[in-house]
Amino acid sequence: MELDLHGKTALVTGSNRGTGQIIAQRLATEGATVIAHGFNAGSADHVVEVSEVAHAVWGDLSNEAGCQQVVDQALGKVGQIDILVNNYGTAEEKRWPQADTDDWLDMYQKNVLSAARLIRLLSPQMRTLGWGRMIQLGTIGSTQPNALRPAYYAAKGALANIAVGLAKELAGTGITVNTISPGYIRTPEIEAAFRAKAKREGWDDDWETIEKRIVAQRFPNPVGRIATREEVADLVCFIASQRAGFINGQNIRIDGGAIDVVH
């Protein structure tokens, strides 16, 4: 399937590592001119060096000045942004008794306002272009939260809410807004954490066995495994493409069927 991303430019936040890096690389493979982002100077340069990603920018998205810096750098390199992937976000491992007001505000700054600032800065030029894609990376925890990370899940729930309201705000502009919400993803960090757990608890150390335990204990789903970064990136590429032009204001789960609800 031809996704027709040639001639499009994309900014992927938090793409110096993890799932964001694979999203940036996949978009570039599909023909887009892609800008990777990291928080510190030079932190995303390696993505350009090892892939077809064209440019790298940096800046702290948890404040106004950092977001403006990222946008100025990006537009200075490519002139316009057609596709904004708000991949950046961070979780706080604090339950209700531990999470204080500052923790809640921190999660909102990093997971919601980081995206909202970039949307405000980049949506006017997308309106002028008459075409655009705003894609947020959420989590199935915004639909089915647990007790472990209340501030994080609440923030991600707000991020999904934004997509619905923003799609209405941008009606008739040619810009679509969607949220993509994965469950567990096999990132190097997740794999390392579960391999360490396997070692502590005396499991077999092959990944197939570890993954089966993850599914049984933490993430039961009909597919029987967790997502790869490439699968999440492929969904982002499709939603960013011309072929997804009638998908708008949605929270699209990629979870192997873990959440078994009917909407």
Image (spheres, rainbow, N blue to C red):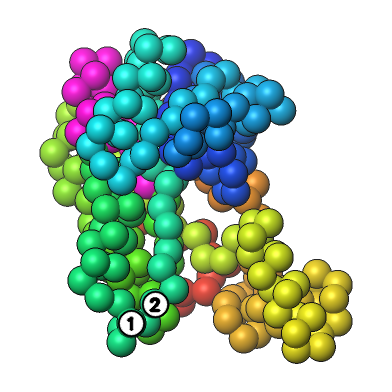
Mark number displayed over residue 72: none
State the image quarter where residue 69 is shown. Answer: top left
Residue pictured at 80% horizontal, 69% vertical = 207
Could you tell me which secondary element the residue under label 2 belongs to? loop
Q: Is residue 206 left or right of residue 159?
A: right
Q: Nearer the viewer, residue 8 or 122?
A: 122
**Please, what is the three-letter code of the amino acid marked with disc 1?**
Gln
Q: Nearer the viewer, residue 146 or 230?
A: 146
The total of numbered circles placed on residues is: 2
**Please, what is the three-letter code of the amino acid marked with disc 2?**
Lys
Could you tell me which secondary element the residue under label 1 belongs to? loop
User: Relative to 85, does residue 113 appear above or below in the rendering?
Assistant: below
Q: Is residue 215 left or right of residue 159?
A: right
Q: Do tag 2 and tag 1 residues touch (Cβ < 8 Å)?
A: yes
State the image quarter where residue 23 is shown. Answer: top right
Q: Is residue 84 visible?
A: yes
Q: From which residue to which does the magenta span run?
A: 118-136
Q: Quadrant of the C terminus?
A: bottom left
User: Relative to 72, does residue 93 appear above or below in the rendering?
Assistant: below
**Magenta stretch: dominant secondary structure:** helix
